[in-house]
Image (spheres, rainbow, N blue to C red):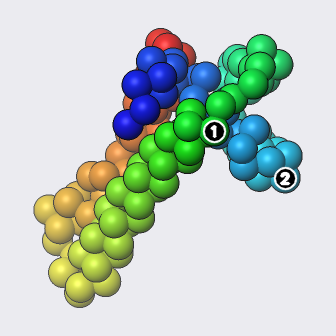
Amino acid sequence: MNPSVTMLAGMRKAAVLLVLLGEDVASQIYRNLPQQDLEQLTKEIAELDYVDPQTALAVLEEYHRMAAEKLRALSRSARILTSGRTGATTVAAALRPWHGPATANAKRLRRN
């Protein structure tokens, strides 16, 4: 990964990503954010200057990698839940990847 991207704080990466995704997508994401995150992201976007192509590509690649990982986890969970096995352990295993990641991610972003 581009060293300049690894140096970016989480909220700055999110700001770069939202700018790259465009207004329509960004507005859909904004609707689902807590007020504190929305304010911080808005501030980061306002402070963005030029984003060089290498940084833009690296941010998009990181987002793609993370989204692909989530999709694989969702697929595994769906297979477990539709397998016909409904025991508590099976359901817990299927839901484990989805218990708390959004909260953990939000806390991590706020620290950066």
Lateral position of residue 110 relative to residue 42, left or right: left
Q: Which mark is residue 53?
A: 1
- Looking at the picture, does residue 89 appear above or below residue 14? below
* Rendering coords of residue 92 (x, y %): 23, 58
For the image, the number of numbered tags is 2
- Looking at the picture, does residue 2 appear above or below residue 4? below
Residue type beneath disc 2:
Asp
- The 10 Å Cα crowd at callout 2, few under 14, some 14 to 19, many 20 or more, is few
Helix or strand or loop: what does disc 1 sit on? Answer: helix
Residue for badge 2: 24
Between 96 and 39, the one lying in front of the other is 39
Lateral position of residue 72 relative to residue 14, left or right: left
* Rendering coords of residue 87 (x, y %): 17, 71
Figure quadrant of residue 76: bottom left
* Gap in angstroms between the C-alphas marked 1 and 2: 21 Å
Outermost residue to the bottom: 84
* Rendering coords of residue 38 (x, y %): 74, 26
- Would residue 35 be visible to someone looking at this image? no
Sequence-wise first label, 1 or 2: 2
Helix or strand or loop: what does disc 2 sit on? Answer: helix
